[in-house]
Image (cartoon, rainbow, N blue to C red):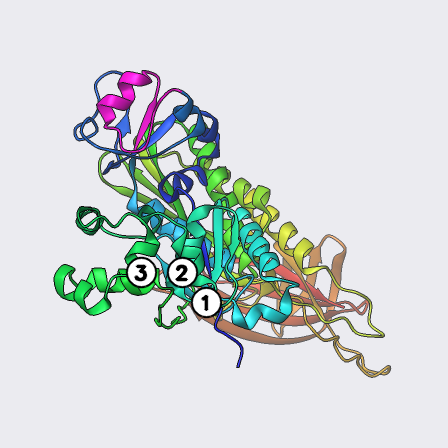
Amino acid sequence: MSPRRVAFVRARGLHLAALLRVEPELALQPLAVLDAAHAAARGGALPPGFGAARVLACTAAARALGVAVGQTGHHARAVAPDLRLRGASEELLQRARAALLDAVATVGARLAPAPEGVWVDAGELAGMYESEAGLGAALTEAARRVGLPVAVGVAGSLGVAAVAARGGGVTVIPAGEEARYLGRLGLEALPLSDALRAELRRFGVTRVAELARLPLDAAGLRLGEEAAAAVRLARGEDDRPLVPHALPTRFEEGVDLEWEVQTVEPLLFVARRLLDALVARLACRGLAVGGLVLSLDLVTRVADERALPLASPTRDVPTLFALVRAALEKQSPPDAVRALRIAALPRPLRAAQLGLFDPPGPAPDRLALTLARLAALVGTERVGAPAAPDTHRPHAAGVTAFDPPRTPRAPGAPEARALALHVYRPPREVEVLLGEAGLVGLRAGEARGRVVACSGPWRVEGDWWAEPYAHHGYDVELEDGGLYLVAYDPVAARWRLDGVYE
């Protein structure tokens, strides 16, 4: 039986990475994320709670100015007056974790989430990569596609793999070497609480190798359950199972704006970033966007929510952006916007099976792109395939989703011949000559002459409670052989030429 192998994908600086994946332009600016509720930190006085809050993460430009993790907001602003401050957002963290799950799912199927990353069953992937280092590189590249920098550790247990991922890059610990690898590290490498770490240092324990030599029962009895678990981890022992976790089913991205926005252009700039992040997540799962829900949080604490359906699923970001632009320009936000969120309705891309002897149909991706662009230009309700609505109203027509047939239609018999009605839209004005036996003559453009045969009337009436209609139809044959559909509308008290039989 092969030894157990586990990989841990750890997101580096998750608070900062969660913000930069939707606002990547901030990566080159001096920026710090504080352990305070999100609020706009503008120039001048700091918002309430920002002064005493601690720095959780900062960009390279901020570190170059002297900002460091653990400083207070006042201290950070003192060493870097132009520093931009943002509060930590739990909403952004949750979306970043969901994006990491989506990305890692492209490499492995058995996943388990953790606060700082994702565990992956590396044993089932042993035959798919040349080495475990290659597996780590694949996991790193998958996370990069959703905008998250990660470090990967591969070991024989969950705890040791998580410790290995703290070193950065890809770290592979061979089977049976877990205790030797951990023994060279300092105590700060283990995920311990500050209270336990201080208590261990009071006893002179500063290295993982020294912690591993403590008696397990005595450590648990004297220092508590956490100390016993730490001793087992220092020895490379961790028998916790990897329990697979279901992948997220909701795809949503959003950002709290640093300033209230009252015009459309800044919203479109942010919306493009959110659409990029959404499509990257859906592409990891082999899905496309079947529709969008645009939500604007206004300063009046009211949500302006808009549903943006698509004629066909697509992953084309410019098309989705055109749809959002059309919605915002058609109806501007009623008030200033303080947050923007976009949710995607996931749909699978339609697969097409080509026949050996049939002409090729439209490519699914290009068809989806064309339909989505048409919907953005003229409206979703005007794009699709014609369909007969459930009504008795004469010649009523509707539009349904365009879905080309997967299999070719069977050709009719060579001798088969059907009579089709060509409906005039709009109906044409007609002059009718009436006699004792009914219609005896017509005159409407090229359709004119004596009636030699007539059947009808075929009466249809309805919708008296809303917009009433009435239709008394006659099928007539003229002396030149033409067959026409003539109708009398008793509501409007007029005759009309509705169509010609061909």
Q: Position of residue 152 (x, y in %)?
A: 49, 53
- Quickly name the residue at label 1: 156
Residue 166 seen by the camera: yes
Question: Which marked residue is nearer to the observer: mark 3 or mark 1?
Answer: 3
The CA span between labels 1 and 2 is 7 Å
Q: Which amino acid type is marked by label 1?
A: Gly
Which stretch appears magenta?
65-86
Q: Is residue 173 left or right of residue 500?
A: left
Which part of the image, by quadrant, shows the C terminus? bottom right
Location of residue 366 (image quadrant): bottom right
Labels 3 and 2 touching (C-beta < 8 A): no
Specify whether residue 50 is painted magenta.
no
The dot on residue 196 is none
SS for dot 1: loop
SS for dot 2: helix
Q: Is residue 441 above or below residue 165?
A: below
What residue sits 60% from the left and 72% below the top?
436
- Quickly name the residue at label 3: 212
The CA span between labels 3 and 1 is 17 Å
What residue sits 54% from the left and 45% below the top?
320
Q: Position of residue 259 (x, y in %)?
A: 32, 27
Q: Which amino acid type is marked by label 2?
A: Val
Question: Which marked residue is nearer to the observer: mark 3 or mark 2?
Answer: 3
Closest to the observer, 214 or 416: 214
Labels 1 and 2 touching (C-beta < 8 A): yes
Crowding at dot 3, Cα within 10 Å, few <14 / some 14-19 / many 20+, comes out as: many
Crowding at dot 2, Cα within 10 Å, few <14 / some 14-19 / many 20+, comes out as: many
- Quickly name the residue at label 2: 160
Task: Work out whether mark 3 precedes mark 1 in sequence or the reverse, and give the earlier one.
Answer: 1
SS for dot 3: helix
Q: Which amino acid type is marked by label 3?
A: Ala
